[in-house]
């Protein structure tokens, strides 16, 4: 059998999320690098459909998607071996025995049958997308982004522009956090649309969803943690507020420990919105963050409001390094 992975050179694991795995791969014909995400196809989500409808400088670009077999289990085991993650191949002969789930070993324990092996031949969804070379916003924050407020403001403005485009298409991201925001050639690319859905005016839905979308809790709006799902754009605005805070927060020490960070964010998430004592209340961003973190979603600004407000500090914003030479 053929599969679309044959068109790529051997892969390097970029990491494993809660819903799948991502590899970096070089296309044999165009010789470019792509990120290829593989998730279970039975948890039907909108990721490929949503991504295919979008094209924007500050969103990870979509190229293609297809159904195929799950990656070889042994290859996956070796890929999680941090130091030796090169040379990952997807197996070419897909025997039923080896088609085990690679991210949840507890499933697929039924006897292999012809029907099973047929299903297993197409039970993973692959998405070919733009490869981002600069790590994530998480890395940038941990490396001291807040020491350069010009860069903070420029990156935040790109983030707001990307999100404004997404919202203008009627799409809610629902999993905005610094690990899902990438840097590529120095500019922001919003990625991981695995939780994305179409906007709904209703703030809270009473029905449960099949695939729960509760990802990184510290960034989730309070109304989404009531075990009910919401499809409102104001969810993203809340996450954006937390992200903006982290981008600006000058920590006393070099790096905040995971527990220190969680503690500070938990205080921020209270309805009283408690900023840490070392966060300058006169900072332009202070009120902007506060308005995004309002527990009443109707009181949060829209992304367009935010775009207008970021224009106020436009004069502080640098052009991205690679664009400065094309500036008129
Ligand atoms: P979760 O799915 O729970 O949010 P996650 O964000 O770690 O977890 P994924 O979004 O599936 O998981 O990504 C897995 C890894 O691949 C992450 O380390 C991520 O940084 C990396 N990655 C994902 N997409 C790209 C991309 N387009 N370019 C470069 N690296 C990527
Ligand atoms: Mg992710
Ligand atoms: Mg994800």
Image: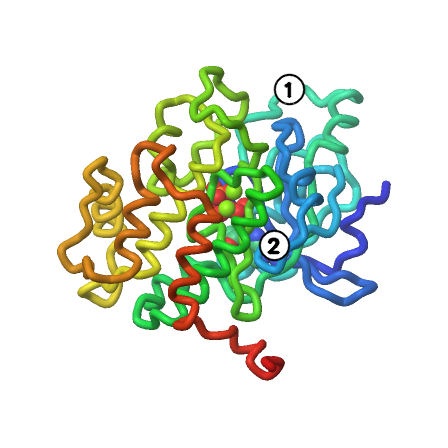
Badge 2, how many Cα within 10 Å: few under 14, some, many 20+? many
| Residue 60 circle label | 2
Residue drawn at (26%, 46%), measured in percent from left and top? 265
User: Which residue lies at the image location 34% right of the left edge and 48% below the top edge?
Assistant: 242
| Relative to 266, 169 lies left or right | right
Residue 81 visible, this orientation: no
| SS at badge 1 | loop
x 39%, y 22%: residue: 227
Q: Secondary structure at mark 2?
A: loop
The image quadrant where one finds the C terminus is bottom right
**Image coordinates for residue 59, horizontal then vertical, percent:** 59, 54
Give whichever of 159, 107 is nearer the camera.
159
Residue in the image at 61% along x and 28% along y: 43
Q: Is mark 2 within 8 Å of ligand 1?
A: yes
Looking at the image, the residue that sits furthest to the right is 1
Say which of 254 and 223 sits in front: 223
Viewer-proximal residue among 121 and 268:
268
Counting from the top left corner in percent of width and height, residue 153 is at 40, 65
Label 1 crowd bin: few (<14), some (14–19), many (20+), radius 10 Å: few
**Residue of label 1:** 110
């Amino acid at each position: 059998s053929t599969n679309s992975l044959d068109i790529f050179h051997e892969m390097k694991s970029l990491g494993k999320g809660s819903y799948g795995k991502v590899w970096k791969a070089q296309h044999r014909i165009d010789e470019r690098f792509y990120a290829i995400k593989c998730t279970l196809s039975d948890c039907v989500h909108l990721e490929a459909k949503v991504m295919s409808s979008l094209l924007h400088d500050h969103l990870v670009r979509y190229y293609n998607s297809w159904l195929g077999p799950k990656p070889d289990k042994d290859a996956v085991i070796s890929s999680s071996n941090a130091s030796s993650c090169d040379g990952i191949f997807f197996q070419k002969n897909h025997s039923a025995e080896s088609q085990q789930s690679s991210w949840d070993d507890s499933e697929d324990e039924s006897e292999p049958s012809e029907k099973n092996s047929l299903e297993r031949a197409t039970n993973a969804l692959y998405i070919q997308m733009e490869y981002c070379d600069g790590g994530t916003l998480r890395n940038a924050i941990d490396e001291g982004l807040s020491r350069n407020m010009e860069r903070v403001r420029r990156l935040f403005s790109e983030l707001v522009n990307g999100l404004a485009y997404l919202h203008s298409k009627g799409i809610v991201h629902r999993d905005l956090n610094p690990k899902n925001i990438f840097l590529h050639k120095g500019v922001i690319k919003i990625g991981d649309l695995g939780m994305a859905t179409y906007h709904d005016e209703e703030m809270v839905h009473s029905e449960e969803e099949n695939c729960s979308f509760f990802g990184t809790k510290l960034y989730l709006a309070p109304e989404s943690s009531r075990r009910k799902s919401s499809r409102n754009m104001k969810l993203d605005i809340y996450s954006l507020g937390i992200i903006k805070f982290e981008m600006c927060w000058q920590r006393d020490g070099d790096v905040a420990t995971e527990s220190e960070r969680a503690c500070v964010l938990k205080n921020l998430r209270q309805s009283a919105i408690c900023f840490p004592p070392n966060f300058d209340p006169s900072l332009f961003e202070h009120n902007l963050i506060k308005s995004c973190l309002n527990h009443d979603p109707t009181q949060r600004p829209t992304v367009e409001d935010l775009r207008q407000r970021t224009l106020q500090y436009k004069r502080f914003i640098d052009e991205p390094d690679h664009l400065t030479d094309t500036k008129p």
